[in-house]
Amino acid sequence: MQRLRTTPRPDWQKIVESQGFLFHSPDEQPYWDEGVYYRFTSAEIDAVEKASYALNDMCLKAVQHVIDNKLFERFTIPPPFVDYVVSSWERDEFTLYGRFDLAFDGRNPPKLLEYNADTPTSLLEAAVIQWHWMKDMLARPGSKIDQFNSIHERLIEAWRSFKSIYDGTLYFSAMADVVEDHMTVAYLRDTAAQAGMETRYIAVEQIGWDRDRRCFVDEFAQQIGCCFKLYPWEWMVREQFAPNLLEGNTRWLEAPWKMILSNKAILAVLWELFPDSPYLLPAAFDPEPVGPSYVRKPILGREGANVTVTVNGRTTLETEGIYGGPYVYQRLYPLPRFDGQYPVIGSWMVNGYACGMGIREDATPVTGNTSRFVPHVFA
């Protein structure tokens, strides 16, 4: 595993914008950085892939454990939605994707930091933007350079599978004023269209409820049969319209059972179930079992907000944000450091397949909303 410098492509901004990547430099700060890249060996990529499949298997077993033992309070799932979650799991409702965030130095087994199982972003840049960068910069006839990346193909394959069980109009939704979410949804909608599905976009704010027909509708009063929403379940079940979720028959993607996996409480449950796994870090709902050096995370936090790093009982880093407790405590694991930057690997699962990764790096050990995305290759 190496961090290497390279010269960005001339007019790279126009190139990535032509590929749908309009949020490469928010507030004039670089988010996409092609002045560097990470190079892995084939064995290191195999290690990430193996870890991802093992973690996916453990996560599915953990969901069953939570349901069997009625541990929903740990996840602060509102009581009216418990049966909603359980029914979704028992129906084996379709799941499209998720992203494991891993600490990996190329020598020790990858370690799970958290699982973005409901609304993971950085998808367009992982699936498309870094792939074209590699083709432009490094891939030459006869070159042995490659990239761990079949995300795009797996997404189309997944939608084709979903089309066999749902052949109506598939809505895609995100908040109207969030460019990154809008473009991520636009990309996902394009992959669904390539799979032969009929699609429509609707902003989250435009989704309505028809009181007479008891169903969710679009801005033209057409019933929404199925909707992929880039909008967190933990927000949906706490908003004014939440009771309508239980009455309506709209099918939502990601499925309601992903509320369990998208909650950082799953880290503590995973450790309780699989303490011998080489891919997990000790985690608990209080710091004592974890040790004097740990990371405290809000179980419903996002983008590295409100995270506290404690080393030998002393707080060394605390990020700002809007999230409070409950918290989960995870043993501190030193991230690798290259040229003063800390990389975190996002390993993508699509329809049950480990199929690619993206790397975010930051000058601090906490990956946040402004942490840069950098491409990768392997040889």
Image (cartoon, rainbow, N blue to C red):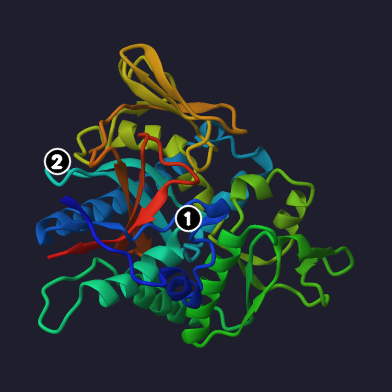
Q: Which residue is mark 2?
A: 108
Helix, strand or loop under label 2: loop
Q: Compare marks 1 and 2 and give the one earlier in the sequence.
A: 2
Q: Residues within 10 Å of mark 1 (few under 14, many from 20)?
A: many
Q: Nearer the viewer, residue 35 or 242?
A: 35
Question: Quarter of the image containing the C terminus?
Answer: bottom left
Helix, strand or loop under label 1: loop
Three-letter code, disc 2: Asn
Q: Residue at x 54, y 57 (%)?
A: 88
From what the image shows, is residue 286 above or below residue 166?
above
> In the image as oriented, which residue stretches furthest toward the front?
10
Question: Picture quarter containing residue 246?
Answer: bottom right
Q: Is disc 1 in contact with disc 2, using a CB cutoff of under 8 Å?
A: no
Q: Which residue is mark 1?
A: 120
Q: Residues within 10 Å of mark 2 (few under 14, many from 20)?
A: few
From what the image shows, is residue 145 above or below residue 322?
below
Question: Picture quarter containing residue 171?
Answer: bottom right
Q: Is residue 129 left or right of residue 147?
A: right
